[in-house]
Amino acid sequence: MTIEINANTCALIIQDLQNDVITEGGAFADSGAPAHTISQNVVANAAAMAAAARVAGMAVIHVHYIVEPGAPGLKLNAPLFLGVKEANSLVRGCDRRRCAVRR
């Protein structure tokens, strides 16, 4: 089946490729996401898709989730958000590989 995509009315959305999510040593490394990222060649595939979308004239939108240090205002109504706070992860300007963990 062929699907036609109109580059003028569509966008490629690339979401949640932060270091804390997809790299070894990141806050969520125990989830298996880094190994899956490597096995599926996620970063290179996303880069190739973005390049192709741009050549076609399509918008490319990168979405990442961040919190401020200490996660003020973070809603704790889902286990994922509680994990973000407990792991001190996804903090603006930091990831586990570059910043000291502040608790």
Image (cartoon, rainbow, N blue to C red):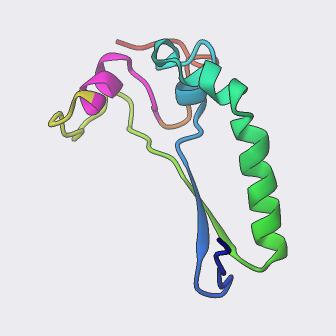
- Observer-nearest residue: 8 or 81? 8
* Residue 22 within the segment the image draws in magenta: no
Where does residue 58 sit, x and y in percent of width and height? 70, 76
For residue 49, side relative to residue 28 (left or right): right
Question: Left or right: where does residue 93 sit relative to residue 89?
Answer: right
| 30 with respect to 80 (left or right) | right
In the image, what residue occupies the spot 28% across and 32% down? 81
Residue at figure coordinates x 39%, y 21% from the top left? 88
Check the image and report above or below for 93 versus 52: above
Q: Which residues are magenta?
A: 80-91
Q: Is residue 3 above or below residue 17?
A: below
Give 36 or 78, whichever is nearer the viewer.
36
Q: Is residue 76 left or right of residue 10?
A: left
- Front-most of residues 12 and 3: 3
- Please report the residue visible at 23 percent of the width from the left and 28 percent of the height from the top: 79
The number of numbered badges drawn on the structure is: 0
- Where residue 61 sits, quadrant-wise, is bottom right
Q: Is residue 88 magenta?
A: yes
Across and down, in percent, residue 72 comes to: 25, 36
**Residue 37 at x, y percent in the picture:** 65, 29
Q: Quadrant of the C terminus?
A: top left
Looking at the picture, does residue 82 appear above or below residue 51? above
Q: Return the residue found at the far left.
A: 77
The image quadrant of residue 93 is: top right
Q: Which quadrant would residue 25 be assigned to in this image? A: top right
Please state the horizontal and vertical placement of residue 51, each as a whole percent of the image: 82, 61
Query: Could you tell me which quadrant the N terminus lies in?
Result: bottom right
Farthest-out residue, front: 1
At a point 59% along the width and 78% down the height, the residue shown is 10
